[in-house]
């Protein structure tokens, strides 16, 4: 087991990893920018190192400073959390060159799954169902028209190096295709420094279903069920739940087994999430995230398995703590992402939290690094906390969530709490009758 882990992140995820490390008896080091000097994870860590000014490029994305912090403190492993450098293959390679363990997959696996075209090829080779579309990057308009005609309109143009909805454009007719191609390429080049794009069939009313997997790097892997992340705004997840209200037991078992077998065949090491669009009983691979997900707590709630413990255990060579036949799925869990944003316009709302009170009681978990008097800096992601609720079934979970949202108090800034209070009482949500377009339509109809 590791002696000392450096946590290369901030906010609630840094605190989440810190707690897991302490439970395993491992010393912790956190890095922070000058803007985060008073953050909770900095206060609770065994050691902290300031690595730069507020801009992420000068601190949390500064690989040289993070490696230097490892060497100064004697950290023998790095947990990257999510975001920042968590899916940076170069970072994983540099740590390996310095004989520091990256708590995550190999640089090669990060590279493969970070390239959307190569990821799709790999998924297809491993037996994972994929969306019909181009086999690789599309460079000519004539080629794009031929592929679109073969698979049928509407189609979606996606950036090969994309994420977060950038470099994605829908074409419903051949006339739309030229503009969509040019716009997607331009956005991809500006956002990712790579203007390669590919084409897929555009599904009209799909769910976003993802499967949590963990591999030991030696050909063994497990799946921990699926999460439904269909409530999204601008391709960003807002509300996640496990299990999905759209799947039956046979479907979830089949897709779980498909994913765990693929991860085992890859000899993948660590936690990962294989994401799908689901429509009319069919799954279509969209990407794999080679890191811990923001929404991982809902999986922990229904399985009782600590995913960060598993990440650390696997990275240290200890293997998986459970076998597939030992995993039991119990109840239902929902996570709401509480952001420092205006609940109507979604503009960021940095500032000082004057009063912070979290809900409690059976089945309630709040992952947050903020406190009364804490100042939300304007430099980073607006997530300030996650409310995770677990119940014996979905009905109980929704009732418990309603109560928890009523108890949650954040004063001094605007937050998205009012949005969730609205959603939890909506009949479509209560019935599990929603898709990836539902939330944006709901917001447009209820300004």
Image (cartoon, helix red, strand yellow):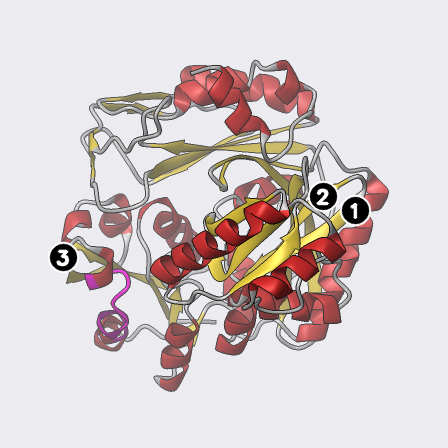
Tag 2 near tag 3, CB within 8 Å: no
Using the numbered discs, state the Cα–Cα distance from disc 2 to disc 3 in whole angstroms. Answer: 43 Å
In the rendered view of the protein, which quadrant contains the C terminus?
Answer: top left
The image position of residue 383, as x and y in percent, is 36, 39
Q: 127 or 295, which is in the foreground?
A: 127
The residue carrying mark 3 is 53
Query: Marks 2 and 3: which is nearer the front?
Result: 2
Whether label 1 touches label 2, CB < 8 Å: yes
Read off the residue under disc 1.
Answer: 282
Residue 182: give x, y in percent of width and height: 46, 56
* In this view, 243 is above or below 137: above
The single residue placed furthest to the right in the displayed view is 250
Q: Residue at x 69, y 46 (%)?
A: 153
Main SS class of the magenta portion in the image: helix
Mark 3 or mark 1, whichever is nearer to me: 1
As measured in the structure, the alpha-carbon distance from the residue carrying label 3 to the one carrying label 1 is 47 Å
From the image, tell me which residue sits under label 2. Answer: 278
Relative height, residue 302 to residue 338 (above, below): below
């Amino acid at each position: 087991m590791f002696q000392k882990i450096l946590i290369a992140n901030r906010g609630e995820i840094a605190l989440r990893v810190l707690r897991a490390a302490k439970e395993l008896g491992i010393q912790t080091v956190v890095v922070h920018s000058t803007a985060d000097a008073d953050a909770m994870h900095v206060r609770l860590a065994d050691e902290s190192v300031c690595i730069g000014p507020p801009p992420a490029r000068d601190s949390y994305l500064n690989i040289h400073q993070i490696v230097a912090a490892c060497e100064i403190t004697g950290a023998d492993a790095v947990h990257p959390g999510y975001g920042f450098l968590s899916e940076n293959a170069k970072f994983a390679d540099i740590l390996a060159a310095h004989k520091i363990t990256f708590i995550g997959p190999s640089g090669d696996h990060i590279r493969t799954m970070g390239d959307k075209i190569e990821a799709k090829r790999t998924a297809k080779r491993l037996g994972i169902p994929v969306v019909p579309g181009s086999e690789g990057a599309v460079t000519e308009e004539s080629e794009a028209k031929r592929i679109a005609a073969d698979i049928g309109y509407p189609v979606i143009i996606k950036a090969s190096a994309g994420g977060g909805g950038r470099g994605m454009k829908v074409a419903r007719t051949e006339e739309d295709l030229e503009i969509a191609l040019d716009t997607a390429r331009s956005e991809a080049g500006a956002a990712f420094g790579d203007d390669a794009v590919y084409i897929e069939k555009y599904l009209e009313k799909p769910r976003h279903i993802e499967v949590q997997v963990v591999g030991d790097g030696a050909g063994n892997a497990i799946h921990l069920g699926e999460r439904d992340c269909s409530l999204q705004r601008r391709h960003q997840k807002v509300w996640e739940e496990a299990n999905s209200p759209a799947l039956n037991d046979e479907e979830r078992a089949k897709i779980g087994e498909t994913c765990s077998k693929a991860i085992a065949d890859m000899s993948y090491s660590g936690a990962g999430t294989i994401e799908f669009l689901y429509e009319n009983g069919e799954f279509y691979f969209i990407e794999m995230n080679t890191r811990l997900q923001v929404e991982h707590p809902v999986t922990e709630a229904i399985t009782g398995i600590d995913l960060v413990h598993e990440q650390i255990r696997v990275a240290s060579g200890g293997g998986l703590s459970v076998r597939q036949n030992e995993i039991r799925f119990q109840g239902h869990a929902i996570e709401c992402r509480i952001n420092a944003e205006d609940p109507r316009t979604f503009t960021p709302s940095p500032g000082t939290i004057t009063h912070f009170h979290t809900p409690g009681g059976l089945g309630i978990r709040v992952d947050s690094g903020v406190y009364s008097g804490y100042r939300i800096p304007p430099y980073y992601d607006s997530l300030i906390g996650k409310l995770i609720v677990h119940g014996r079934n979905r009905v109980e979970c929704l009732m418990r969530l309603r109560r928890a949202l009523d108890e949650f108090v954040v004063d001094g800034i605007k937050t998205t709490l009012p949005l969730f209070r609205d959603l939890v009482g909506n009949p479509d949500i209560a019935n599990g009758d929603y898709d990836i377009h539902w939330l944006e339509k709901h917001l447009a109809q209820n300004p």
